[in-house]
Amino acid sequence: MISNLRKAVRLPQPRTRGVDLSHPARSPLGTAVVNCAVYVDGVRQDGNQPADVAIRRVRESGRGFVWIGLHEPSEKEFAGIVDLFGLHPLAVEDAVYAHQRPKLEHYDDSLFTVLKTVRYVEHDRLTDSSEVVETGEIMVFTGIDFVITVRHGGHGSLGPLREQLERVPEQLALGPSVVLHAVADLVVDDYLDVTAAVQDDIDDVESEVFSERGSGGAGRIYQLKRELLELKRAVAPLDRPMRELASRPMREVDPQIKTYFRDVADHLARVTEQITAFDELLNSILQAHLAQVTVAQNEDMRKISAWVAILAVPTMVCGIYGMNFEYMPEKHWTFGYPLVMALTVVICWGIHRGFKRNGWL
C-alpha cells in the first residue's frame, strides 16, 4: 500500500498554479474557507459540509478525517474552527497573523507546522531592484482525525495537490499525516525549482562579469545576495522540523510515513547546500568584479600619468620661454623657434613610443 506513496505525493506533471474553480468544492464560499471535505478510507465523501457537520460525522463514525483548507483567515473567521477542533491559542495567533519562521510545535492533541512557500518572480533582465524570490506561508494543523491548512500569500495553492491525492485513495486512507507530508514535499519541490531558476540568474551575472565588456554591476550582485538571503530564511529553519517528523515518535504521524519525511529532509539539505554554494559563488563573483574595477582604474591612472608626462615637455619649454629674462640669446636665432618646436615634438614622440611599448597607452 505504501509502494505508490511517492507517486501520490510527488506531482509528475506540471502543477497548476491558482485555485481550480471547476472542482466540486472549490468555489467562492464568501469566507476564508477554500475547501472542506471528509475522507473515509481515503475516498472523498459527497457533499460540501460545514466544518462542524464534517467533524461530527467523522467522530460519530470513528472513521476517516476532515481536511479544511483556508486562505488568509481573519481572527473572526478562524474563531469557529478554533473552538471546534480545540486548537492552541498560540498556534492560532501564528496562523492568523503569519510572518513566522518555519517550525514544528507539538500541542496536546495536534501538531502545528509552519512552512515558507517560495516562488520565482519571472523577469526579462535582472536589475539592481529586481524581485527574484517571493515568499508566502502555509500552516498545517494535524490531528488524529483532521488536518487544517492555512495559506498566506498569492501563490502556493493546494487545490491541485488535493486533487492529486484524491486520485490515490489508498494513500489518503493512512490519515492526515499523508497530507502533511504531501504539503511539505510540495513546498520543498518548489525550493528546488526556485534554486534552479536563481542559478540561471547567477550564471548570467557571472557571464557578464567575466565577459570582455565586464558590465556585471555590483548592484545586481548585491540584489541577488539579498534575494538569496530571503530564500535561505525560508529553507534553513525547516530542516529541524523535517528531521523531527522523520525520527521522533508522534501520535499524529503514521509510522509508515516517517521514511518519506526523511526523503523530504534529504531534499531540503540539498537545497540548503545549493544556497550556501550560491552565496559563496556570489562572493567570488563580487570579488572578481571589484578586482576588475580596480584594474580598470589602474589602467586609467596609467594612461593619465603617461599623458601628463608627455605634456610636461612642452609645458616645461613654454615655461622657460615665458620667463622675462633680458638676455636669452636663442630668441635672436633665425632657426630658434622651429628648432625648439621640432625638439619638443621629437621628445614627446619618444616618450609616447616608450609608454606605448610598455602598454601604458
Image: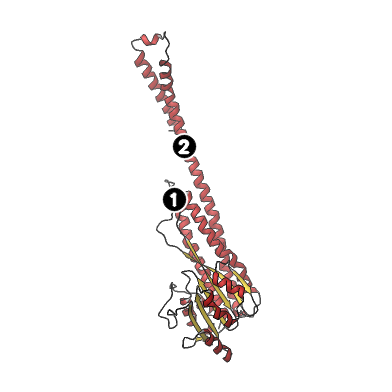
**Secondary element type, mark 2:** helix
Who's the residue at 46% across and 77% down the image? Answer: 159
Q: Position of residue 178 (x, y in %)?
A: 56, 79
The answer to which quarter of the image holds residue 56 is bottom right
Q: Which residue matches tag 1?
A: 208
Q: Amino acid at mark 2?
A: Glu
Q: Is residue 302 above or below residue 279?
A: above
156 and 344: which is toward the camera: 156
Q: Position of residue 99 (x, y in %)?
A: 55, 66
Q: Amino acid at mark 1?
A: Glu
80 and 257: which is toward the camera: 80
Q: Which residue matches tag 2?
A: 299
**In this rendering, position of residue 14 left or right of residue 74:** left
Q: How is the image coloured?
A: secondary structure
Who's the residue at 48% across and 82% down the image? Answer: 166
Q: Position of residue 60 (x, y in %)?
A: 58, 91
Residue 134 in sight here: yes
Q: Residue furthest bottom?
A: 61
**In this rendering, position of residue 90 left or right of residue 230:** right
198 and 132: which is toward the camera: 132
